[in-house]
Amino acid sequence: MGQGFNPDLPSTGMNPGQSYQDAYMQRLAPQLAQSRESTTAALANQGIAPGTQAYENAMRQQAIKENDLLLGATTQGFGVGQQANQQAYNQALTNYNLPLNTLSALRTGAQVQNPSFVNSAQQATTSGADILGASQMGYNAQMGDFNAKQAAQANFNQGLMGLGGAGIMAMSDIRTKENIKNVGWLPNGLPVYEFDYKPEYKDMAGHGRFIGVMAQDVELVQPEAVITNADGIKMVNYGVLNG
């Protein structure tokens, strides 16, 4: 009871002093040699001589195949070694607990219980982060936002085009407006604004928020769509602007 738990875990493979990795490599060596000889013979039968490009390509593929086999053997050797260590650990722990269980049974009269072990987590069953799924979700969100903006812009343009279809002549002089805010652009490059008419023009032009272009902007692009009334106020003919 005064001795600590210090399991003696194995580090050898099939033979004493040989690791599991070395044992798998030793078993694999004849297979690698036979595969290389077969490849060399096949190239010679096809008339492909050493030093040619075709020969170099074939031997490069052979080397890749051999490396894959060696990597698999290394991984398998590590796996067998870990399983052996786990088994030795469980056995050593059982041997360590047996005297303690026996002493406990003698002191309390309880039945001796076999120790229970908890299986260690297997790395192979642990899934990684879903990077592809997260990227796809981000892409879908961006596309949804883009489509929503496109739909909003289409509705916005359709509303302004409707003014032209109705032959609307709108008071569009910037001097008659206030609380002006740019909210978009027409396909021809003209900026579109949201605005209120100044109090002295509300009875004539309307109350509330409006959306439209500025006559001063239209004059620079399509002056024939702008007229000036008798009071010197500029107005935009949306029918001409949309044509």
Image: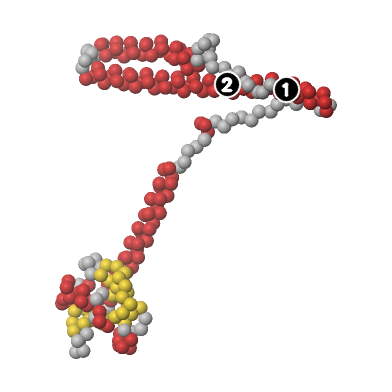
Q: How is the image coloured?
A: secondary structure
Image coords of residue 129 (percent x, y): 47, 41
Q: Is 149 displayed left or right of 21 in the figure? A: left
What residue sits right under mark 1 in the picture?
Answer: 1
Q: Residue at x 31, y 84 (%)?
A: 198
Q: Earlier in the sequence, mark 2 or mark 1?
A: 1
Taking depth in this image into account, of 130 and 16 the one nearest to the observer is 16
Q: Mark 2 is on which residue type?
A: Asn
C-alpha span from label 2 to label 1: 24 Å
Q: Residues within 10 Å of mark 2 (few under 14, many from 20)?
A: some
- Compared with 41, 228 (above or below) is below
Image coords of residue 146 (percent x, y): 35, 58
Q: Is 107 displayed left or right of 210 in the figure? A: right
Q: Quadrant of the C terminus?
A: bottom left
| Image quadrant in which you'd find residue 4 | top right
Taking depth in this image into account, of 243 and 146 the one nearest to the observer is 146
Q: Residue at x 63, y 21 (%)?
A: 6
- Compared with 114, 26 (above or below) is above
| Image quadrant in which you'd find residue 35 | top left
Q: Residues within 10 Å of mark 1 (few under 14, many from 20)?
A: few
Q: Is residue 181 in view from this perspective?
A: yes
Label at residue 85: 2
Q: Nearer the viewer, mark 2 or mark 1?
A: 1
| Image quadrant in which you'd find residue 111 | top right
Q: Mark 1 is on which residue type?
A: Met
Dot 2 falls on a residue whose secondary structure is helix
Pointer 2 with pointer 1, Cβ within 8 A: no
Dot 1 falls on a residue whose secondary structure is loop
Q: Is 231 displayed left or right of 143 in the figure? A: left
- Compared with 231, 226 (above or below) is above
